[in-house]
Image (cartoon, rainbow, N blue to C red):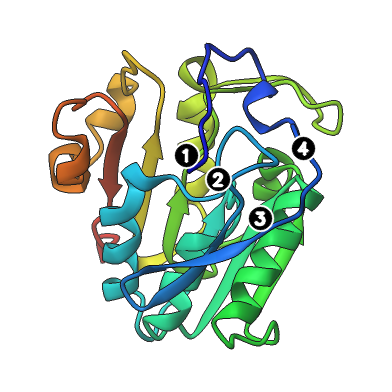
Amino acid sequence: IVYKTRERQRGSEQYRRRGDRGEFFPVREGAASLLVNLHDYLDTGLFLDHRPLRLRLGREAKGRDFLNLFCYTGSATVHAALGGARSTTSVDLSNTYLRWLRRNLAENGLAEGRHRVVRADVLAWLAEAGPAWDLVLLDPPSFSNSAAMDSSFDLQRDHRALVEAALGCLRPGGVLYFSNNRRRFRLDPELASLPGCEDITAETLDPDFARRPNVHRCFRFQPPPAAG
């Protein structure tokens, strides 16, 4: 039994290292074996509220090129890869979590050849990315002011530009899932009015979180084919 007290966190405190035991063990989630660490961080490396979305991505990834933005420990990448993704690209700024992602890939027998791992400021990286993916997951933090970033990030303030940049990564017919855990989040009206945008939060809530329907918000974007 591991006991933790969860208190209100500021900025990046949620991700700060709190121990140095380095103990990882696997847990099963669908077809995936995912490594968790119960001692060294406030979070274990696996956000349980996103379990239905990860399983959904695994079902939809076959034959597609998958992009995971703010990938954390890469659990969604593992599901997409095991679901038959043609390739995966995972982007995050944290070396700690990218190492964890690589361990998760190895845990599932997934070679890095088809599964690219990129350390970058996602916002800056998107400015250089083109329409090369069929399935994209965008799951940003609510706030970040990392010294390695070019500027601070506030989800409510900045999400429209971020989503628009992520939509620019889609090939025709591609799908973007945009999820976040900010309480009282409001999707920008311009984004909400886009053809092919739908709020799928209710579809992505696990029964374990039925008493907390505001634990996250999730939106699906599938731009219609261009006319002509």
Q: Which residue is mark 4?
A: 19
How far apart are the alpha carbons under marks 1 and 3?
17 Å
Q: Residue at x 47, y 46 (%)?
A: 138
Helix, strand or loop status at disc 1: helix
How far apart are the alpha carbons under marks 1 and 4?
38 Å
What amino acid type is highlighted by mark number 2? Thr
The disc placed on residue 164 is 1
- Image position, residue 130 (x, y; %): 60, 61
- Image position, residue 122 (x, y; %): 67, 44
N-terminal of the two: label 1 or label 3?
Answer: 3
N-terminal of the two: label 1 or label 4?
Answer: 4
Image quarter of residue 195: top left
- Image position, residue 178 (x, y; %): 38, 43
Look at the picture and state if 134 lies above or below 12: below
How far apart are the alpha carbons under marks 2 and 4?
12 Å
**Residue 21 left/right relative to 187:** right
Farthest-out residue, right: 147
Q: Which residue is mark 3?
A: 91
Category of crowding for the residue at label 1, using alpha-carbon neighbours closer than 10 angstroms: few (below 14), some (14–19), many (at least 20): few
How far apart are the alpha carbons under marks 1 and 2?
31 Å
Q: Which residue is mark 2?
A: 44
N-terminal of the two: label 4 or label 3?
Answer: 4
Helix, strand or loop status at disc 3: strand
How far apart are the alpha carbons under marks 3 and 2?
19 Å
Q: Quadrant of the C terminus?
A: bottom left
Helix, strand or loop status at disc 2: loop
Category of crowding for the residue at label 4, using alpha-carbon neighbours closer than 10 angstroms: few (below 14), some (14–19), many (at least 20): few
N-terminal of the two: label 1 or label 2?
Answer: 2
